[in-house]
Amino acid sequence: MLKTCALILPALIPSWRFFQTVEASPRVEWTLLATARETPSKWHPLRPCPETVTPLQMLARLFWNPARNDALYITSCAERIALGLCPHSVGEITTRILRDITTLPIHSCTKLMQFRLVFVAHNGTELTRETVFLSTPVATLR
Amino acid sequence: MSLELAQRFTEILLALAFLQQSAEHMSGPNAARALFLTRAVLCLALLTGVYSDWSLVALSIHSIAVLHRYNGPYNGGSDRMGLLILYCLTLSHWLPEGPLTQTAFAYLGVQVILSYFISGWVKILNPAWRSGAALRDVFAFSAYPVAENLRALAPHPRAMRTASWAVIGFEVLFPLALLNQTLLIAALACAAAFHIANACLFGLNRFVWFWLAAYPSILWLQSRLIAPA
């Protein structure tokens, strides 16, 4: 009951402080491992932005935008994890990565998946990247 | 605009916004199909206008299941606006007819005004927004631009400062539009264009439909507060 109230109240009494400050922004990256002790050699961005989107695609996305909205949800989950470990958000990101990688040709010796959250920020004149979370490796679905 | 007409417009626009959202969930790769099929059916019932009261109650109860499923709103501010509209509409239907009904619906109108004003006010207090640096950061490294080539807009300080002040100015001055109905309609048209631009550049399409759904409440509120010029 208390949790339900906590979920409903921000909708009934919204803060409306959109973009009050522009904080460091999360990127989700995943890797595949043969063993839990292996040091990851290559990290892949989860659902990276396309290089370009045409004006026609932008207009079409006003009406149909499921992939982008899911990407925004993943960003929300990453921010929730950064605020304090949130098993629900870890689960949501893990589920999506495992589902995505089932379509990839994966080397047979890679049996585990791990993801990390890298926060990108503007530090004076250049962009900096800081890893703030590393997930526990989980078995892939294959 | 009468209260009944404003409520009906809001019901139709909200049902369409929820239908659009439900269709995306049902067809997306991570669909929670059963959950959003239920919402879609309830929205179709709301669209028909038959038993609107009960459709709104059912949608309100259903919204709690959706909040629990995602441990909060799926898409932040846009989902919260959708829920605010839903709860205000439901209350305005079920509270005893008279001042209470009107207050519930007026609360939605007030929140629409605050959604612009507060958003502008917090920006105007922030030096990074006033200089354009905050908007530069949005384009430079935030997760929002829909394509990598949009990041090329970041290193244009004059354009960033001008765009920042255009947004800030519009948002903080928005409440003044309540003084005149024509001015309010023009301001709402500008606001809709602003949401469409955000949808194109940042992929925030759900904001467009939920904010549009809230506009009848502010048009009704204006007609209640200030006699037509």
Image (cartoon, coloured by chain):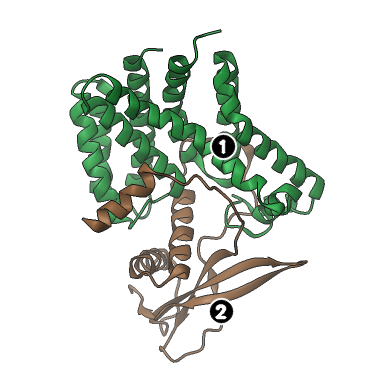
Chain colours: A brown, B green
Q: How many marks?
A: 2
Q: Is residue B40 visible?
A: yes
Indicate the chain on which mark 2 is placed. Answer: A
Q: Residue at horizontal 68%, vertical 35%? A: B169
From the image, tell me which residue sits under label 1. Answer: B117
Of A39 and B215, nearer the camera is B215
In the picture provided, is A41 more to the left or to the right than B30? right
| Residue at mark 2 shares a chain with residue at mark 1 | no
**Picture coordinates of residue A67, whole percent (x, y):** 46, 50
In the picture provided, is A72 more to the left or to the right than B104? right
> Label 1's element?
helix
Residue A112 has which mark?
none
Q: Is residue B211 above or below residue B96?
A: below
Of B102 and A142, nearer the camera is B102
Q: Is residue A57 visible?
A: no
**Picture coordinates of residue B37, whole percent (x, y):** 25, 41
Question: Which one is in front in this view, the residue at disc 2 or the one at disc 1?
Answer: 1
Q: Residue at horizontal 51%, vertical 32%? A: B113
Q: Amino acid at mark 2?
A: Lys
From the image, tell me which residue sits under label 2. Answer: A42
> Label 2's element?
loop
The quarter of the picture where residue A93 lies is: bottom left
**Picture coordinates of residue B220, whole percent (x, y):** 42, 18
Distance from label 2 to label 1 (Cα)?
46 Å
Q: Is residue A62 above or below residue B103?
A: below
Q: Residue at horizontal 76%, vertical 40%? A: B162
Of A75 and B116, nearer the camera is B116
Indicate the chain on which mark 1 is placed. Answer: B
In the picture provided, is B123 more to the left or to the right than A36? right
Circle 1 residues within 10 Å: few <14, some 14–19, many ≥20: many
Quadrant location of the C terminus of chain B in the rendered image: top right
Q: Amino acid at mark 1?
A: Phe
